[in-house]
Amino acid sequence: MGDMVAPHAGIHQAFSKADTTISQSIRSIVNLVQRPGLIRIGFDDLVAALRSPNGRCLFGFGESDSDNRAHDALAQALKSPLMDRGRTLADAARVLVQVAGGPGMTLSEVEIVMKELDRHISDETQILFGTAVDGRLGDRLSVTIISSFTAGDLSQTQPPLSSPPPVPPALEQPHDSPPKIEVEPEPAPIEDFQSETIPIEEPNLPEVESAPAPSVESVSNAFEVVDTPEPPVSMPRRKPAPAKEEKVSAEKSMQAKQEVLQFEPINRGRFEKSEPTIVEGEDLDVPTYLRKKIKVK
């Protein structure tokens, strides 16, 4: 904050200048994303430029409407209090730059800005470039620069420590006396006791008289074989056939058919003079009922 105002300026003027710088930074970032341009910068480009493990970023904004407005706008952006006067841009991994102006902005002015900015960055730095034409700017030309610290930049900005940190004194460990070995007394010997033998009296059991073994004759008599008579087997008798059936069968056997002898030749009709048509021994010219001897009623 001390770089924004004169050394003898009041504190109210210093905070007012700081508020103006922060509000201008916020407006520039919003216009950077929302403003349509010839080469537009998206939100992903903004996130890539601000991606850093340290969480610190660089921001610079400059605007001019003079005859040499490209040079003046870039100089103001590099002198911004949030840019560290451009000293840390040489070690930045990514730098986002947008050049915006009114309808009168020329291509040569854009080239002047990029050539002068190239002096402050290294060859390995990735540049995210964008340009836009905004009629609200009129004759003014603005330059916006956004970047972030790297791990090397942060270590360089931190001042070295004047004295090494104090080393805590070593604690003296007391010498431990050797442990005392306690000897346990030996146990007293155990006297052997003689076991007394106790006599065991056996009980007197009464004698049981043994029964005499049975003789062989009595056993054989007990298992005598008894002959049981078998029941007579009766054969089934057939029923006699009725007498009527025998008479009917006898009558049928006695009846005989009497064939009729045909002594007269068969009349062949109109086929009498022609040769007979005989197939399998039958004359087909004779009517069927005559050949088959069928009686016609």
Image: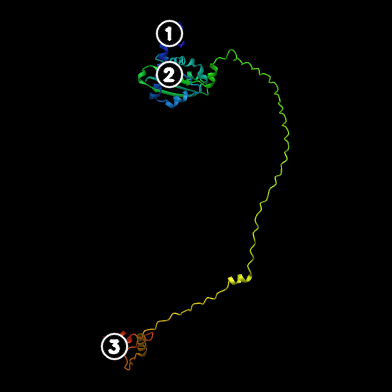
**58 vs 261: above or below:** above
Q: Is residue 267 left or right of residue 211?
A: left
Question: Image quadrant of residue 143?
Answer: top left
Mark 2 against mark 3, which lies toward the viewer? 3
Mark 1 against mark 3, which lies toward the viewer? 1
**Colour mapping:** rainbow
Q: Is residue 204 left or right of residue 156?
A: right
Q: Amino acid at mark 1?
A: Ile
Question: Image quadrant of residue 69?
Answer: top left
Q: Is residue 202 left or right of residue 229?
A: right
| Residue topped by disc 3 | 270
Q: Is residue 164 left or right of residue 130?
A: right
Q: Residue at x 62, y 72 (%)?
A: 217
Mark 2 Cα-neighbour bin, 10 Å: few <14, some 14–19, many ≥20: many
| Residue topped by disc 2 | 143
Disc 2 to disc 1, how far (Cα)? 29 Å
